[in-house]
Image (spheres, helix red, strand yellow):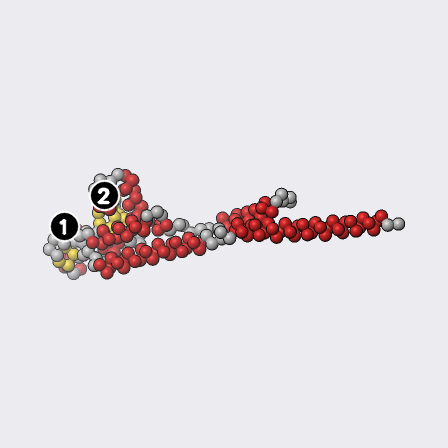
């Protein structure tokens, strides 16, 4: 193998290492690493936790979160937020419409906001179907909302730390390549020098009568 320069030699050492590293299976990149995602998650948590009802069509959520009139792009944006963060949100279809809800408020619907009354499970069973459909959960208190928001911030922090841990070798390889090039180039020159001196001594011995 012929190496034309120290840099080429270093590159030759680094390429197999990079090839090997690329073969290591990587975990799916966290959705929290997407631009602006943490802010979107926090905004959705605040809105859905405080609303009278925690579920609505995604287009309606998009209108409240992004502005009065939204296009397909904004609907897709918030659909991705709800879909990629099941730790906080749940998506479902009802009568053909895709809806999203805050997971913490999606179950145990015993609260009637029209009369500000919370029913027991036994009382709920005695209600008519129409009245049961009108039940929801109470809006969350400030401390509960803060707990969820802090959890989202912590998950984002962990995702960043994990990404940095997976990339520790990126700044290390270029200096390692240069060092390897210099080291092996010196060793090669030293070996060639020894070989030449030995060859010259052998030639002189052969010339002696």
- Secondary structure beneath label 1: helix
* Residue behind mark 1: 130
In this picture, residue 188 sits left or right of residue 10 = right
Picture residue at 83% right of the left edge, 51% below the top: 205
* Residue behind mark 2: 67
Q: Are marks 2 and 1 in contact (CB under 8 Å)?
A: no
Residue 123 lies, in percent from the top left, at 14, 59
Quadrant assignment for the N terminus: top right
Say if residue 23 shows up in the picture. no
- The image's mark for residue 141 is none
Ranked by sequence position, the earlier of labels 2 and 1 is: 2
Residue 42 lies, in percent from the top left, at 28, 52
Picture residue at 26% right of the left edge, 51% below the top: 43
Rounded to the nearest whole Å, what is the CA distance between mark 2 and mark 1? Answer: 32 Å
Picture residue at 88% right of the left edge, 49% below the top: 209
Along the line of sight, which residue is nearer the eye, 180 or 90? Answer: 180
156 is higher (above) or lower (below) than 58: below
97 is higher (above) or lower (below) than 184: above
Q: Residues within 10 Å of mark 1 (few under 14, many from 20)?
A: few
Q: Quadrant of residue 59?
A: top left
In this picture, residue 48 sits left or right of residue 17 = left
Say if residue 40 shows up in the picture. yes
Residue 92 lies, in percent from the top left, at 26, 47
In this picture, residue 150 sits left or right of residue 2 = left
């Amino acid at each position: 193998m012929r190496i034309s320069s120290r840099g080429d030699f270093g590159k030759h050492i680094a390429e197999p290492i990079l090839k090997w590293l690329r073969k290591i299976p990587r975990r799916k990149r966290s959705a929290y690493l997407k631009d602006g995602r943490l802010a979107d998650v926090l905004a959705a948590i605040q809105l859905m936790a405080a609303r009278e009802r925690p579920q609505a069509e995604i287009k309606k959520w998009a209108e409240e979160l992004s502005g009065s009139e939204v296009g397909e792009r904004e609907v897709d944006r918030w659909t991705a937020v709800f879909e990629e963060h099941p730790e906080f949100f749940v998506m479902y279809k009802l009568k053909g419409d895709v809806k999203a809800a805050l997971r913490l408020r999606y179950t145990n619907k015993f609260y009637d906001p029209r009369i500000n009354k919370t029913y027991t499970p036994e009382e709920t069973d005695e209600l008519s179907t129409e009245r049961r459909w009108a039940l929801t959960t109470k809006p969350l208190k400030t401390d509960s909302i803060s707990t969820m928001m802090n959890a989202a911030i912590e998950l984002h922090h962990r995702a960043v730390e994990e990404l940095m841990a997976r990339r520790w070798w990126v700044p290390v390889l270029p200096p390692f390549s240069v060092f390897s090039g210099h080291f092996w180039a010196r060793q090669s020159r030293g070996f060639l020098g020894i070989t030449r001196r030995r060859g010259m001594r052998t030639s002189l011995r052969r010339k002696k009568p």
